[in-house]
Amino acid sequence: MKKIIYFAGLVTVIGVTAFTANCSQAEEAVPDNSLTFNASLVSDYRFRGISQTRLEPALQGGADYSNNPTGLYVGTWLSTLKWIKDSGGSGNIEWDIYAGKKGNFTQDLSYDFGVLSYVYPSNGLNPSADTTELYGQLGYGPAYIKYSQSVTNLFGFANSKNSGYLDIGANIDVTNGYTVNLHAGHQTVKNNSASSYSDWKVGLTKDFGFLSGSIAVIGTDTNNYVGPAPDRKNLGKTSLVIGATKTF
């Protein structure tokens, strides 16, 4: 039976920093060091357009430390998932560990680069699902372009080192705490062109103060089936995904 490996990974959490002016309109000072935590509930964990949870909900959470004068940061993030067991392995947790540096070249031109490891404890797959990528991102206003390249095999694909993912998009602040989220991406799998595909997202997030809500339509140009007939599920199909995130 052909073994099918499904992509997994990190859900990117976009933080919104609120600046509060006092009566003299002076800005609050940004601390040199910051530590934040986040917790989320999503109707479907999608990574690069592919469902990691068989089109079912996931619990997620993480922590981030930043040194603001230097732009250096480290963080960790975890999610429940189902694709490891669907692929013949064991375990239902993804654990991400990352570090990098971000800042600005000019007032409008930003950068972010670093390393990210996706760890699936005791996944039992051969090759292992564990994956490490280097990434670099440039931003101009609300728009960005990001490229990630694996320095290991990619999520269980044999001989797939140096696979790449191109991500372009924009997060456009509209009004009253609403942000429009636009994304298009293309995953290239080294030495396995049949598994390369493209994905896209059109979404909206809203900062309610006590938490952030999100709604998005997500799709791909690939079919990625799991389960026995007639109840097979296409993990790459276009569908609506909603979520709620609390940052503290």
Image (spheres, rainbow, N blue to C red):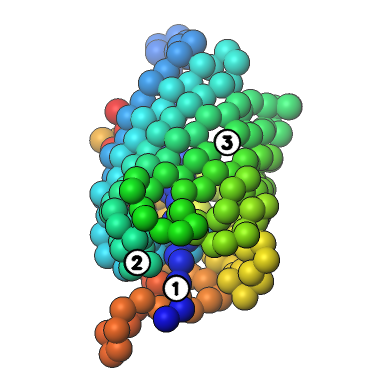
Q: Residue at x 57, y 53 (%)?
A: 153
Q: Earlier in the sequence, mark 2 or mark 3?
A: 2
Q: Residue at x 34, y 61 (%)?
A: 89
Relative image position of residue 226 (x, y in whole percent):
36, 76
Return the residue at label 3: 115
Asked whether the residues under the numbered discs 1 and 2 touch, taking CB atoms below 8 Å apart as contact, a structural biologist would say yes
> What's the amino acid at mark 3?
Val
Q: Is residue 171 left or right of residue 160?
A: left
Return the residue at label 1: 3
| Of labels 1 and 3, the one closer to you | 1
> What's the amino acid at mark 1?
Lys
Q: CA distance from mark 1 to mark 2?
A: 8 Å
Q: CA distance from mark 2 to mark 3?
A: 28 Å
Q: Residue at x 44, y 30 (%)?
A: 75
Q: Judging from the image, what secondary structure is the residue with disc 3 in?
A: strand
Q: Residue furthest bottom?
A: 230
Establish if 50 lies above or below 133.
below
What mark, if any, has residue 88 been given in the picture? 2
Relative image position of residue 247 (x, y in whole percent):
32, 33
Q: Residue at x 62, y 58 (%)?
A: 160
Asked whether the residues under the numbered discs 1 and 3 touch, taking CB atoms below 8 Å apart as contact, a structural biologist would say no
> What's the amino acid at mark 2?
Gly
Q: CA distance from mark 1 to mark 3?
A: 28 Å
Relative image position of residue 74 (x, y in whole percent):
48, 26
Q: Residue furthest right?
A: 106
Q: Earlier in the sequence, mark 1 or mark 2?
A: 1
Q: Residues within 10 Å of mark 3 (few under 14, many from 20)?
A: some
